[in-house]
Image (cartoon, helix red, strand yellow):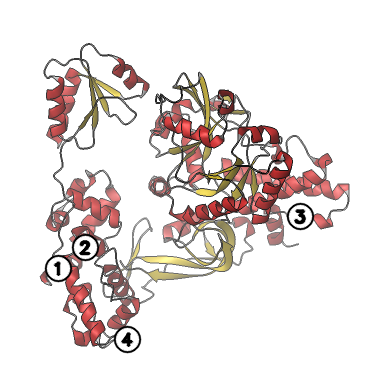
Amino acid sequence: MSDKEKNETELVPDIDPDQIDNKKQVKKAARKLREAIRLHDHKYYVENDPLISDSEYDSLLRSLEDLEDQYPEVKTEDSPTQRVGSEPNEELGIVDHPYPMLSLKSVYEESEADNFFETIKDEAQLDDLQFFCEPKYDGLAVELIYENGAFKQGSTRGDGDNGEDVTDNLKTIKQIPLRLLETDSHDHPDKLVVRGEVFIPKEEFEKLNKKRESDDKDPFANPRNAASGSLRQLDPSVTAKRPLGIFFYQWANAAEHNINDHSESLEIISSWGLKTNNNLNSVCPGLSEIKKHYQTLKNQRDDLPYEIDGMVVKCDHFSDQEKLGSRSNSPRWAIAWKFPAKRERSRIKSVEFQVGRTGQITPIAHLEPVEIGGVTIKRASLHNQHEIEEKDIRSGDRVLVERAGDVIPYIVKPITDNRDGSEEKIELPESCPVCDSEIVVSDDRKQAHCTNISCPAQLKERIKHFVSKEAMDIEGLGEKRIQSLVDLDILTSVEEIYNLDQADLEEIDDVAEKSANNILSEIEDSKTTDLHRFLYALGIPETGTHIARVLCRNFEALDDIMKADKDELTTIKEIGPEIANSIVTFFNEDHNKATVNGLIDSDVKPKNKLYKQRKPLDGIKLVFTGELDEWTRDEIKDKVETLGANATSSVSSNTDYVIAGEGTGQKLDDAKDENVTILDEQEFKKWLKDQTEEK
């Protein structure tokens, strides 16, 4: 066996059950599986450095489970199959769960879901079973305890019996109420035990990793690791800076309060202010409905703002759950039906460098074909030279590949243990692979650009972007027609679109008189576009449709945006230094200014319909309590609302400030419970003066 083969076997032991025919072989196979699983547990949970895909890990665990089920004598107390979660961190403090937090048995094939359904029917001896289906979130499971409606304690799953105390960290998550809402239909129990999943949205995960990279920190491997690392902090102020969310999925002791169904229990806790995912949850009376909902969630998966990796199926009636009972570490009445894997291993065959619409040069890896999430992947982005060098990715490497949504897959990391010496370092070309012009590389090696603005690859992509539906919406100029116009030297710049005539268009093979007239009509109509569409059409790096709209809400005219400096741009909430620098750089370049002026000279007149005059207190929520010396309640409410604030009558987790005068009451207590900043009248006057002067 070569070193390469040996390393492969150590990562994913090749255990063939048909070749195991004596006790010695059983023990050896179980030992190899446990060693591999422990290695991957440590690499994933401790070092944030996974070596294999989730599906490969799950396969290892299932092989060990099957082996131990068939040969119970080889099962040990410290086997990974006996573990629910990870060992709790004693530094955070240990919490005993009032009820065990069990994990779920995972299934991957439709036939396994069929077996679960038939087994449940047989064991429950019922034909009218009702099931509840919900997303399986890819985050961190937590338990929260409320006493008399007030949040008292929160913990992680830990080992199922004991978890880590993360009470103060959970309090920083705005979606978690510190006090439950009152309802007429259901009173709060003296003690409420609920479970939920803490997650980090996909978009925020990307921003967090960019920030970590800019701070020379290792990026998180995936949103699950980011959520876990964010919540399991010794300093709650670190957690408070992370954009965490939560969905609640269980009232653990609901049956003790005469609640009959899981679905009913979620409706009740939702009315108390605990966030449930009613849009994606579904009651399913039978197997066909379960399968339909699975397909629905699988189809929606990539479009959701957070990660889900499967669907949880559970008996809805608590009486059925009680009848079926639990195994040592998982309930018999529920499964996690996992989606196809989004991360697998492959090998880099070669690397090419592509030129994008802004001239940016991106390395693309050509891979040995691998199926991820039902799609055969042959290419993956390497992003930039900095990432290649930071991760030490080489041509010929075996690599971990991830596919997220419809974007091109990317390389998570190389599996360096598999190298045999034949791998080659990946180097940036010295000149543009399309036009052979000079390449300019940023100091941090994260950006590489072709300097030739007339580079054919760049020009075609710029025009293609400019006429796209979200931009100027010139539908008749599709990719093939653009390619023809560029190849014929009819289009040598974006602004020349507005100089096209019928004769130019009829040079294209598939364009006759009628088609040419239709295209010219679309070009003419595009001259009266919205400003945010025009900005997006220009292809400013880091400026997508959202940032284009943000700019239009904050600046009245195109000239104002073109003249804005970095300091002015970064005062806008959604615009950070990187985006601001990109916008300023774009409009400072002579050829870009010439392009914009050329479009305006061609009678393109973008109009800004999104601009609104900003007010000093826009978006701020205030609550006044007690009597103020200088103003009556109506006077101060009118004053702050004129300045853009929202003066509300009750305190919530969304309140920014509570202003307390003489004779305060319950609102002051509510503010303390919600951790809302409290100002007395003098502090408020100073704050108000600062806000109005700043703006």
Q: Earlier in the sequence, mark 3 or mark 1?
A: 3
Type of amino acid at the residue the image marks with label 4: Asp
Mark 4–mark 1 distance (CA, rounded to whole Å)? 27 Å
Q: Which numbered tag is attached to residue 534?
A: 2
Which residue is farthest top? 663
Mark 1–mark 2 distance (CA, rounded to whole Å)? 9 Å
Q: Earlier in the sequence, mark 4 or mark 2?
A: 4
* Left or right for 299, reference 643: right
Mark 4–mark 3 distance (CA, rounded to whole Å)? 59 Å
Is 311 situated above or below 140? below
Type of amino acid at the residue the image marks with label 1: Val
Type of amino acid at the residue the image marks with label 2: Phe
Q: Secondary structure at mark 2?
A: helix
Q: Residue 21, position in %: x, y?
A: 87, 53
Q: Earlier in the sequence, mark 4 or mark 3?
A: 3
Residue that label 1 marks: 604
Q: Secondary structure at mark 1?
A: loop
Marks 1/2 in contact by CB < 8 Å: the verdict is yes
Please name whichever residue, 146 or 540, is drawn nearer the observer in this view of the structure: 146
Q: Secondary structure at mark 3?
A: loop
Is 444 situated above or below 172? below
Marks 4/2 in contact by CB < 8 Å: the verdict is no
